[in-house]
Image (cartoon, rainbow, N blue to C red):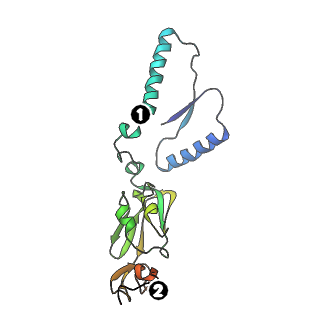
Amino acid sequence: MDAIKTNSTPLNQNWEDVLQQTNQILDQIDESKIKIINNQEDTYLSRRGFFLSLQKVSLQLVKTMTPALWKIKVNEWKVVRYFPDYQFYQIELDIEKCTFCHMCLTFCSQNVFTIEDGFLQTANDRCVNCSDCTDICSEGAIKVKEEFRKKRITKYKFTTNTCQTCGIEFSTFQPEKEKCSICYNRNPEWLSPFE
């Protein structure tokens, strides 16, 4: 889209503000700005023009009524594919809340989360704000924030400890933590499977 057609009435202030913000973003990524064009159409149509306009309107109606899955292949059109050097969202991980259960790694359809060299990495440029990670996180440790900028990878250092209660190795962002999240959250009045 490179232009907005209007009739003789000027755009209201909200439209102008949104258009200005959009043009600033387009300028940052070296794309052409959106212009406003006055639409000067004749109000009278010939019989042929009338039927041609009906045909055009009916085709537009069919296009808008067609389900999106029929029009494009799922996951084919993603804005991140067209702007590989930028990120549109920033993933924020609260390491105090995170139990490192790996659910975000498993369920993220965009492969935003990876583990490499003792770090949990988030590739923010891959995020499309699908909410898979925020929906699956039972601790509420993940937030996705809209942020347009040059892409960057965020790294979170984790350590591997041995649980003092069950003896199983677990990963955590708090090196001083002595119990895995299962043993830590277990009610001590319940029967212990380890005694």
- Circle 1 residue: 66
Residue displayed at 64% across by 26% down: 8
Residue displayed at 57% across by 13% down: 44
Q: Nearer the viewer, residue 192 or 180?
A: 192
Query: In screen coordinates, is 10 left or right of 166?
Result: right
The spot of residue 75 in percent (x, y) is 36, 48
- Distance from the alpha carbon under mark 2 to that under mark 1: 58 Å
The mark tally for this picture is 2
Query: In screen coordinates, is 43 left or right of 110?
Result: right
Query: Which of the two discs, 2 and 1, sits closer to the camera?
Result: 2
What SS does tag 2 mark?
Answer: loop
The spot of residue 80 in percent (x, y) is 40, 51
The spot of residue 67 in percent (x, y) is 41, 37
Mark 1 residue type? Thr
What SS does tag 1 mark?
Answer: loop
Residue 105's tag is: none
- Circle 2 residue: 189
Q: Residues within 10 Å of mark 2 (few under 14, many from 20)?
A: few
Q: Nearer the viewer, residue 76 or 124?
A: 76
Mark 2 residue type? Glu
87 w.r.t. 8: above or below: below
Residue displayed at 65% across by 32% down: 10
Asked whether the beta carbons under mark 2 and mark 1 sit within 8 Å of each other, the answer is: no
Mark found first going from the N terminus, 2 or 1? 1
Q: Residues within 10 Å of mark 1 (few under 14, many from 20)?
A: few
The spot of residue 1 in percent (x, y) is 48, 37
Identify the image quadrant of residue 174: bottom left
Residue displayed at 58% across by 42% down: 19
